[in-house]
Amino acid sequence: EEQGDNISKLGTQLSEEKGKNALLTEQITAVKTSMSKLSSEYEIITSVKNELELKCRMLEDNIGKSDKKVSEAQNLAEEREEKLLATKEDLNAAKESLVDKEEKMRTLLAQISCLESEVSKMKDAYIALESNKIEQDSKYITLQDSLHTAH
């Protein structure tokens, strides 16, 4: 009779462990899905960041070239005073545009940093869940072995 009670208790524990394992499996699947989405978003943002960095370098090169043209225009200031003023206005607009794009790039870099942090946290959570699942699987196997031994 006592052995029957023990078998019943082991059966109950086994059912509880199965439930816990199922819940852990669901949680791991949800974490994997979230990590996959974050990874995709991270790749997109990284691609955009790389494009922006390239455009910023190109703009910096263009500003350097424009500055050289300004120097040449100043040598011809008497003949080209109106053209020089127009070129300076264009340069100022280009510099303002570069500053705006640089601010946007910094914002994107900060967002990427946050995403990297989130991805790291998700990875840590995933590892903890996997570890917990392994522990639960071990308990489940031990209980199954105990149940078979009890029979």
Image (cartoon, helix red, strand yellow):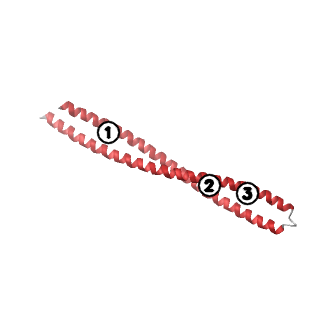
Residue at the outermost top position: 149
Q: Of the residues shown, which amino acid type is indicated by label 2? A: Leu
Query: Mark 2 and mark 3: span between their CA atoms?
Result: 16 Å
Q: Which residue is mark 3?
A: 63
Q: Is residue 86 above or below residue 50?
A: below
Q: Of the residues shown, which amino acid type is indicated by label 3? A: Ile
Q: What is the x, y in percent for residue 8?
A: 17, 39
Mark number for residue 144? none
Q: Which residue is mark 2?
A: 52
* Residue at position x 45%, y 44% in the image: 123
Query: Mark 1 and mark 3: span between their CA atoms?
Result: 62 Å
* Residue at position x 24%, y 35% in the image: 144
* Residue at position x 80%, y 60% in the image: 70
Question: In the structure shown, which secondary structural element does the residue marked by tag 1 occupy?
Answer: helix
Q: What is the x, y in percent for residue 108?
A: 57, 55
Occupied quadrant, residue 2: top left
Q: Which residue is mark 1?
A: 136
**Label whose residue precedes the other's in the sequence (1 or 2):** 2
Residue at the outermost bottom position: 82
**Label 3 crowd (10 A; few <14 / some 14-19 / many >=20):** some
Q: What is the x, y in percent for residue 134?
A: 35, 37
